[in-house]
Image (spheres, rainbow, N blue to C red):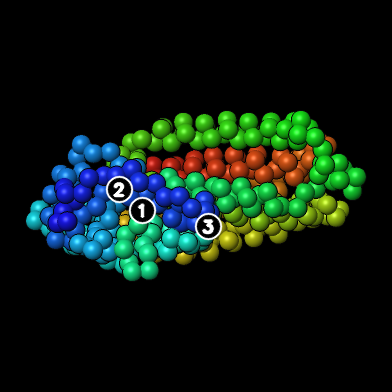
Amino acid sequence: MTSSAEVAPTTEKFLGPTDQALHHASRNVPTSTADTLVEDALAAMRGKRFDSAAAVAVIDARQRLRGIATIEAMLAADPGQRVRDVMDSAPPAVAPDTDQEHAAWQAVHRAEPYLAVVDGDGRFLGLISPQRLLGVLLQEHDEDLARLGGFMRDVESVRTTSVESVRNRLWHRVPWLVVGLLGAMVSAVLMTAFDAQLNADLAVAYFVPGIVYLADAVGTQTETLAIRGLSVGVGIRRIVVREALTGLSMGILLAAVMWPLVAMMTANFALALAVSLTVIGASSASTVVALCLPWLLHRLGRDPAFGSGPLATVVQDLLSILFYFAAVTALLG
């Protein structure tokens, strides 16, 4: 194989445990060799359908991964440059049996829109696309919420909920999930409202999954504390000030870490500032939401263990997206 033009896209899907990285990888992605001209690699992609075209896997004749080049970097390449000139020669990569949550965090930590899966000999097995990475993060977040300690009025209520019929289980849970579904639709509408920003700079889209996940993670920690406090008689008013300050402080710390990483990756200081400001705002807002919802449901006589998680996730995600694109619009024009 000498160029991406000689590689026909496949639709190979990997089987195996669904919680491992290989299950989420696809070989139906653009590939190339390091010596291929960038313009030839881009031309070879036209007319083909891929599971994801956010990045090009650079492999050698023995199918070993040599690097990854983002489409953004290739589109910005000068005439005559080769793929090796624009690729990341040390891309984030994981083994096939890597746990999916650890794998997704590798990509988030590096702020990359891709994650490679390679075997012990370095042979390329596939790329995990941004959509799959976001799906893994959301799945893991939902599992974390499911592990939260529940809050009930008495021990008998806990026992009843644990052994109740399927009909009652559905009655208690489905309405909240319907709210979550509606929130997901609203999020999609919000994203379409910012097509101009996304089309102007593809890098803007790279950080949406990480921002949403960080905001949800900060909120989940606060929500756990709030529900546990309610279960032992500690009211929200006793913790609201300290917890709100904690959320703000965590946002500032996370923003301080992300700013130089985003700036180095994109060479766009305005985008780095937008990401950092969004993390501060989203972390602070998520903390407040995670405090208010359990309190409100408790006052209404509803079980916070069922409603807080789905509702908080919807509100936190919507606020995070709004904060981010507002910052992008203000700073990037």
Question: What is the number of callouts on the image?
Answer: 3
Task: Evaluate if marks 1 and 2 touch, with contact meaning CB atoms under 8 Å apart.
Answer: yes
Q: CA distance from mark 3 to mark 2?
A: 22 Å
Q: Residue at x 63, y 50 (%)?
A: 143
- In the picture of the structure, the residue carrying the numbered disc 3 is 101
Q: Which one is in front, 153 or 53? A: 53
Q: CA distance from mark 1 to mark 2?
A: 7 Å
- In the picture of the structure, the residue carrying the numbered disc 2 is 29
Callout 3 secondary element: helix
Task: Evaluate if marks 3 and 1 touch, with contact meaning CB atoms under 8 Å apart.
Answer: no
Q: Residue at x 71, y 48 (%)?
A: 291
- In the picture of the structure, the residue carrying the numbered disc 1 is 127
User: Of marks 3 and 2, which one's residue comes earlier in the chain?
Assistant: 2
Name the residue furthest left: 80
Please state, as top left, top right, bottom left or bottom right, where the C terminus lies in the image: top left
Callout 2 secondary element: loop
Where in the figure is residue 85, as x and y percent of width and height?
A: 18, 62
Label at residue 78 = none
| Callout 3 crowding tier (Cα within 10 Å): few <14, some 14–19, many ≥20 | some
Q: Which one is in front, 205 or 24? A: 24
- Is any atom of residue 175 visible in this view? yes
> Which amino acid type is marked by label 1?
Leu
| Callout 1 crowding tier (Cα within 10 Å): few <14, some 14–19, many ≥20 | many
